Amino acid sequence: MRISRYFTLLIALVLTATAATAQTGSFLNIPDDVRELATGGVNAGSDAVIALDDDRIKADVSYLMWSPKGVASNIVTADLGYRLGKLAIFAEAGMNAYSPYDTYDEWGNSTGEYSPSEMFAGIGAAYRIIPGLGVSVMAKYVGSNLAEGARTSAVCADVNAVFRLKSLTVGVSGSNIGSGTLPMLLEAGARHSFSFGKTLTLGVGLDAGYMSQGQNGAVVASAGVDLKILDMISVMAGYHFSTNTAFEPSYVSAGLGVDIAMIKISAAYLTGNPYIGNTLGITLGCAF
């Protein structure tokens, strides 16, 4: 099939993409949907899920007030997806704006303030190979502007695969592949939903993986639950664990969500960590 050949070619192209330099890009592995963040960051399929869902169009915008007592950055992300049959096309973008800091010349005179920032933009495709099995790939451009006169950039790729059987979803993913200067994350996860009549649905998710960047590395794991009431109100909680908290922090998370027709609103709160504690996030999305 022509679509299958094009999709295979896209995977080959983005996986061979490389870049010369980039800064940390640590915000790249923060979930852009706060419902995922509220359940500890459990990921079971990520972008590939769009190829399996019934919705034709999905869109959302998220805002995070990240680490208000630490780096105090503001993260804004947006994504849009359109599915046509077995194939779906999607795009994502994000900006991480840090708090400004004072700058000085070589004589110690103040020269004003500098506002460091990072951004990414990506475009990708997802394909349903057979009922219940989907794959996705996204090419991303990452730009970093953390210091005056020190702009850097990189190109990388995200690759995902997901299998869904009734209430069970299993996924594997690779994020930020293609540049050793970015935090590459390889993980696998699963999520299962339990229904209790027409009133309650309980989702339980687990995942684990390995994150690396230069000489840094950490084994990471997440566990989360999502209780949905009357198919409208969601109460979420989770825990994210890291073996190297200086590189990837551990945290406890909680959140609330409301679904009204095609509109989805959700909020998340992180605690249990002196560095990123009191982080708040909100997502406004729609699907139809």
Image (spheres, helix red, strand yellow):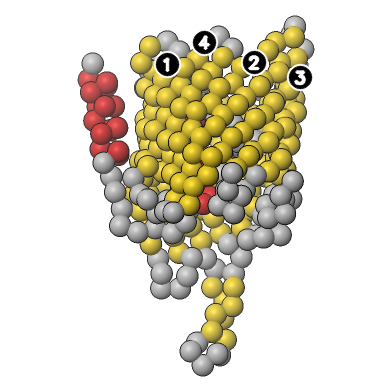
Return the disc, 1 or 4, that comes first in the chain's sequence.
1
Farthest residue, direction top: 197
How far apart are the alpha carbons under marks 4 and 3? 23 Å
How far apart are the alpha carbons under marks 1 and 4? 9 Å
Q: Are marks 3 and 2 in contact (CB under 8 Å)?
A: no
Residue 9 vs residue 34: left or right? left
Return the disc, 2 or 1, that comes first in the chain's sequence.
1
- Mark 3 highlights which residue? 229
Asked whether residue 195 is in view, the answer is yes
Q: Identity of the amino acid at label 1?
A: Leu
Is the residue marked by circle 1 packed among few (<14), some (14-19), or many (20+) residues within 10 Å?
Answer: many
How far apart are the alpha carbons under marks 3 and 2? 13 Å
Residue 12 point in image, percent of width and height: 25, 34
Q: Which mark is residue 165?
A: 4
Q: Identity of the amino acid at label 3?
A: Ile
Q: Quadrant of residue 42?
A: top right
